Amino acid sequence: MLLLQDLLIGQEYDEEIAREFGGGTTGMDFLGVPFIDPQSLWTTLLRFVFNILVCWIIIHCFYYKKSNRKDYYFTFIMFAVVIFLIISLMENMKMNIAYALGLFAIFGMIRYRTETIKIREMTYLFVVMGISIVNGMALSTSYLELLIVNLLVVLIIWLLDGTKMLNHTAMKIVLYDRIENTKHGKEADLKADLIERTGLDISKVEVGHIDYLRDVAFVKVYYKPADGEVNTIDTITKLKDFTD
């Protein structure tokens, strides 16, 4: 007995082993589950605040600044919150990573049937999900490395969507009534008439479906927005499709 005690005293203290067997908790538990683990709690809260701050900067300063879509604002924030908490708790419980990835494969199949999600919204949704997964799983990564990774994502978004590095071109579908201008060879007249009537900085015009019975045609107009804003109803041609 004394020999075993001497061997135990001679062993170095391992925090990982102690945490695995409850050494990092307060010692109070219920049915084998500790009431509180201070170190794990503060680590989760710190990374949670950091993740929400980064996602909020991306959503509020880049996405919402152009689109003004409060519904997607709410969706992106809630995705960031829930995904981070699920991933963080799964990592703390040492759950299989394949199970976690399978869960987000289900998220990836979500389709909002009330409205087709545009590519820009899908891109920001993917960014928010990816950042939340990284911040939730990187428990063994240093804070500096995690900060640099998040700053790189924000920097790339700022360069591509927050500056004029990429010249944004918007598109609008117009039901055009002067069908004589849709003839081949009158492209200049068509473009000049649309510029005069819409006041847009039009760069290109494409003629689509032509209805000779009603003397109208669908014309696709490419133009440069005055302030770089994103118009979410440019492609709507039916009244029933116009929703808030």
Image (cartoon, helix red, strand yellow):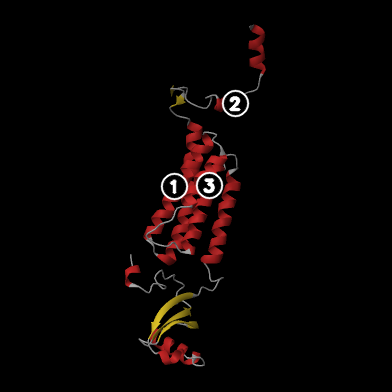
Dot in front, 3 or 2: 3
Vertical relation: 217 (above or below) 152:
below
Q: Where residue 195 sits in the image (x, y, percent)?
A: 43, 86
Q: State the residue lying farthest toward the top.
A: 1
Q: Of label 2 and label 1, which has the lower sequence position?
A: 2
Q: Is residue 43 visible?
A: no
Q: Which quadrant: the C terminus? A: bottom left
In primary-sequence order, the first of circles 1 and 3 is 1
- Residue carrying label 2: 17
Q: Residue at x 46, y 49 (%)?
A: 80
The numbered mark, 3 or 2, whose residue comes first in the sequence reads 2
Q: Secondary structure at mark 1?
A: helix
Residue 34 can be seen in this image: yes
Residue 210 found in image quarter = bottom left
Q: CA distance from mark 2 to mark 1?
A: 30 Å
Residue name at image x 53 percent, y 44 percent: 102
Q: CA distance from mark 3 to mark 2?
A: 26 Å
Please provide percent x and percent y for residue 157.
54, 61
Q: Could you tell me which residue is drawn at 53 percent across and 51 percent down?
A: 130
- The residue identified by callout 3 is 133
Give the residue type that dot 3 points to.
Answer: Ile
Q: Is residue 141 above or below residue 124?
A: above
